[in-house]
Image (spheres, helix red, strand yellow):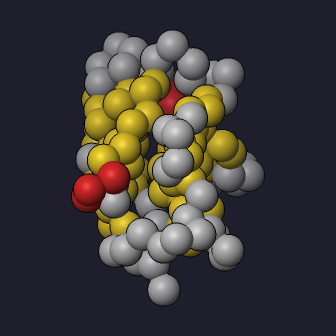
C-alpha cells in the first residue's frame, strides 16, 4: 500500500507563498497521477491541481490558475505545489492524492492565510 507524507503547510499573510510537498513511499507501474485537493470544514473536498507521471501534464482548478504551480520529481516520487499570491479563501486543509488502481490519500496539511 502506498503511503503519502505531506509537508509544507503553515500560516502566511495574504499575498504570501508556501510550497507543499507530498512524497510517496513507492511508485507503482499503474500510478497515473499525483495531485492536491483541499477542504474547508463543512464543505466538500475540492480539486486543486494534479500532474500525470507520464508526460507531466498538469491540471488546475480555475481558482488557482496563474497562482499555483505543480511539479514533480520522479526520482523522489514527490510532487510539489508552489502556492503564490495566497488569498484568505485558500485557507483549507490540503490533501495529497495518488491516482492508481485505487486512490491513496495523505492525512492533510493545514494552510492558513490571514488578511
The image shows residue 55, relative to residue 14, as above or below, that is below
Look at 52% across and 40% down and name the residue there: 55
Image quarter of residue 76: bottom left
Q: Nearer the viewer, residue 18 or 53?
A: 53
Q: Nearer the viewer, residue 18 or 34?
A: 34
Look at 29% across and 24% down and name the residue there: 17
The image shows residue 72, relative to residue 89, as above or below, that is below
Position of residue 59 measured from the top left corner of the image (x, y, whole percent): 62, 32
Looking at the image, can residue 113 be seen?
no
Q: Residue furthest right?
A: 44
Look at 56% across and 33% down and name the residue there: 58
Q: Nearer the viewer, residue 35 or 101?
A: 101
Q: How many tags in the picture?
A: 0
Image quarter of residue 31: bottom right
The image shows residue 90, relative to residue 29, as above or below, that is above
Quarter of the image that includes the C terminus: top left
As drawn, is 17 to the left or to the right of 2? left
Look at 41% across and 22% down and name the residue there: 86
Looking at the image, can residue 106 be seen?
yes
Position of residue 100 measured from the top left corner of the image (x, y, whole percent): 62, 68
As drawn, is 84 to the left or to the right of 49? left
Position of residue 48 measured from the top left corner of the image (x, y, whole percent): 59, 38
As drawn, is 41 to the left or to the right of 53? right
Q: Nearer the viewer, residue 6 or 74?
A: 74
The image shows residue 30, relative to residue 48, as above or below, that is below
Amino acid at each position: 500500500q502506498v503511503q503519502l507524507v505531506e509537508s509544507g503547510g503553515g500560516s502566511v499573510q495574504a499575498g504570501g507563498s508556501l510550497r507543499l510537498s507530498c512524497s510517496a513511499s513507492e511508485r507503482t507501474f499503474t500510478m497515473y497521477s499525483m495531485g492536491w485537493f483541499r477542504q474547508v470544514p463543512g464543505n466538500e473536498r475540492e480539486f486543486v491541481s494534479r500532474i500525470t507521471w507520464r508526460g507531466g501534464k498538469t491540471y488546475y482548478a480555475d481558482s488557482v490558475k496563474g497562482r499555483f504551480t505543480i511539479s514533480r520529481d520522479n526520482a523522489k516520487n514527490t510532487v510539489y505545489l508552489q502556492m503564490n499570491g495566497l488569498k484568505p479563501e485558500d485557507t483549507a486543509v490540503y490533501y495529497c492524492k495518488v491516482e492508481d488502481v485505487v486512490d491513496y490519500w495523505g492525512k492533510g496539511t493545514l494552510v492558513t492565510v490571514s488578511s
